[in-house]
Amino acid sequence: MIGPLKKLQARFYATGTGRKPVREWLLDISEDDRRLVGKDIQKVEFGWPIGMPYCRSLGHGLWEVRSDLTDGKIGRVIFSILAGEMVLLHGFVKKTQKTPAQEIELALKRKRELE
């Protein structure tokens, strides 16, 4: 059950074999960065609907959680709202100003698997 103030419950997308790519990505980044991303996901869970600077629509039912990481890096977690849940589809460190099309396509592919 979602807590009294939480509007969305976040869950990890899982592949057919049970892998959870966003969870794996989070475990690969530093503990400080993981904490920052977690806090930003939590802001979306409790504040939904929420806009900039924490969250932005990418179109096609995809949204991104925007995180400023350590050492000037930028992290993004792409998610979709499915069956009233925030499904974390893809996470990555952003290296360009614009979100790369292949990152969006991967998240969109995962979203379609769940629909």
Image (cartoon, rainbow, N blue to C red):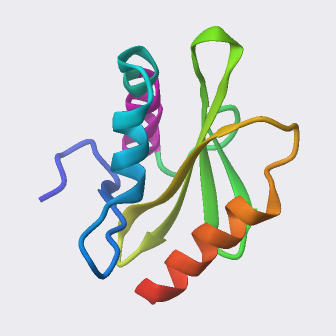
- Can residue 42 be seen by looking at this rendering? no
Range drawn in magenta = 36-47
- Quadrant location, the N terminus: bottom left
Place residue 114 in its image quadrant: bottom left
Q: Position of residue 18 (x, y in %)?
A: 24, 71
Q: Is residue 85 above or below residue 31?
A: below
> Is residue 99 toward the left or the right of residue 30 in the image?
right
Q: Position of residue 23 (x, y in %)?
A: 34, 48
Q: Is residue 80 above or below residue 9?
A: below
Report the residue that reaches farthest toward the top.
71
In front of the other: 37 or 40: 37
Report the residue that reaches farthest toward the left.
1
> Is residue 107 toward the left or the right of residue 15 in the image?
right
- Quadrant location, the C terminus: bottom left
Residue at 48% from the left image edge and 49% from the top image edge: 48
Q: Is residue 50 above or below residue 11?
A: above
Residue 113 lies within the magenta run: no
The chief SS type of the magenta part is: helix
Q: Position of residue 17 (x, y in %)?
A: 26, 77
Residue at 85% from the left image edge and 38% from the top image edge: 96
Residue at 40% from the left image edge and 57% from the top image edge: 21
Residue at 59% from the left image edge and 68% from the top image edge: 107
> Is residue 14 toward the left or the right of residue 67 in the image?
left
In front of the other: 76 or 46: 76
- Can residue 91 be seen by looking at this rendering? yes
